[in-house]
Amino acid sequence: MDFVFLFDTLRQLIAGVPLLLKLASISIAAGAVLALLLALMRLSGSRALSLIAQAYVFVFRGTPLLVQIFLIYYGLGQFPEVRQSIAWPLLREPYWCALLAFTLNTAAYSSEIIRGGILSVPFGQIEAARACGMPRFLMFRRIIAPQGLRVVLPAYGNELILMTRSTALASVITLMEVTGIASTIISETFRAVEVFICAGAIYLVINFAISRAIAIIERRFSKQVRPLAVPAHI
Amino acid sequence: MINFIELMGFGPKGWGALLLQAALMTVTVSCAAFALGSALGCLIAWARISGNRVLQVASDAYTTVLRGIPDLLVIYLLYFGGSTALTAIAQKFGATGFIGVNAFGAGAIAIGIISAAYQSEVFRGAYGAIAAGELEAARAVGMPRWLMFRRIIAPQALRYALPGLGNVWQIAVKESALISVVGLTEILRQAQVGAGSTRQPFAFYITAILLYLTISTASGWCFQRAETITTRGVRRG
């Protein structure tokens, strides 16, 4: 094992971590807002809104993320209307295109998770809230959100890890995050195994941190539903 | 719109035939990867439930690592790492120059070993759903382990695993798009070529999306059928 090379590679790869974290966190945050909106559309009771949300989820979950990135980055520029619009300075940049694609993609997956969480709240509680005349937003904030969040957390944690892993695709449209730097080093040195070990270690550390964080939040949110401590001798 | 139909059609200027061929390649490489993933996934699930501590830790590490590392990195590893290894071996035998591995093989193996990580979890869950009494009964009558696997475990586990396998298959189809990065002419690669030579990227990528949606809808339907067939013997209600 060539430790000098490993150490040097690791140092170069770590330079890509800030971009990776930025891509992941911004798209996850924006995606969560969009996902909540989609889940509410789906559950709104309006047929049209529900169909739109369903079609959205179908398209974004049924196609590879890489195709979505290409469609946004290369495809949109085909239209002169887009090239002359005010959004063009942003849509020309690979960074914003990747962010947009990641956001739209994670929103589709998360909206299904959130929908499951909302549906898991027993209907009797919603009925009770309605019966005492609670406004809808207050009901969402006090009754649905806290209980739904508890159910959603494990699946959402999974989605966070998958999204972090997916940011690697940004390297295909020239962004130099960890995988981008890794592929450059591989093509310069042809030492795929060593570079893979270093890059893989970085991703595993990040994923480990996410799953620990989710576990801690989960424990905090489920305090009141934890079974009572029962003496062992019963 | 007429322009679009002509572009994607089967006429002299149309890209239809090439795109369909590419779609076939996507399905083929996904099938190869999925089959490899099933075989490997079965072994990993077996290692996980074997009760052997070392095997358990190893299979746990396998699933954690392959589900956490970007699929693109795994493809790079197999493609470039494979080529380097192959070149080194060839040089031992006196050959000169660089030998590249086949993009299909490297891609299918990469997606396959990732799929194995997902499939092992599905299989493990399915095995857990088999009633313990049945396994006990099989052991009690002295059934050999392989026969027990073939007659008791496999048919029932497959039934429980089907919905999960459907999901994993869809993941494999989507991940196969990444193999375009190392040059395999599947849907995405063909769309890139078309977009480059006609300067109509939007038209080609939208067509690619439609092809992927067709594949996922059709395979979703197939898995639904398979589920109805395998659960014929299950009484409901």
Image (cartoon, rainbow, N blue to C red):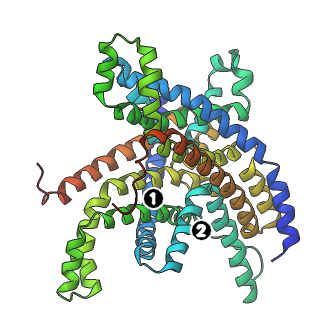
Q: Residues within 10 Å of mark 1 (few under 14, many from 20)?
A: many
Q: Which residue does the image show at 63% across and 70% down from the upper left? A: B101
Judge whether B12 appears above or below A53 on screen. Answer: below
Disc assigned to residue A142: none
Q: Residue at x 67, y 65 (%)?
A: B77
Q: Is residue A15 left or right of residue B211?
A: right
Asked whether B237 or B70 is in front, the reply is B237
Question: Which of the 4 image quadrants contains residue A103?
Answer: top right
Residue B54 versus residue B201 in the image, above or below:
below
Identified by mark 2, the residue type is Asn
Q: At which x and y percent is residue B213?
A: 41, 41
Q: CA distance from mark 1 to mark 2?
A: 16 Å
Q: Is residue B233 visible?
A: yes
For disc 2, the chain is B
Where is A56 relative to A157, above or below? Answer: above
Secondary structure at badge 2 equals: loop
Which chain is mark 1 on?
A: B
Look at label 1 and name its amino acid. Ser
Q: Are marks 1 and 2 on the same chain?
A: yes
Q: Which residue is mark 2?
A: B102
Instruction: Look at mark 1 in the image and give the residue it sits on.
Output: B30
- Whether residue B199 is visible to the viewer of this picture, yes or no, is no
- Residue B90: x and y in percent read 71, 83
The residue lying at 45 percent from left, 66 percent from top is B37
Mark whose residue sits in front, 1 or 2: 1
Q: Position of residue A80 (x, y in %)?
A: 65, 19
Determine whether, in the image, residue B219 is placed left or right of residue B193: left
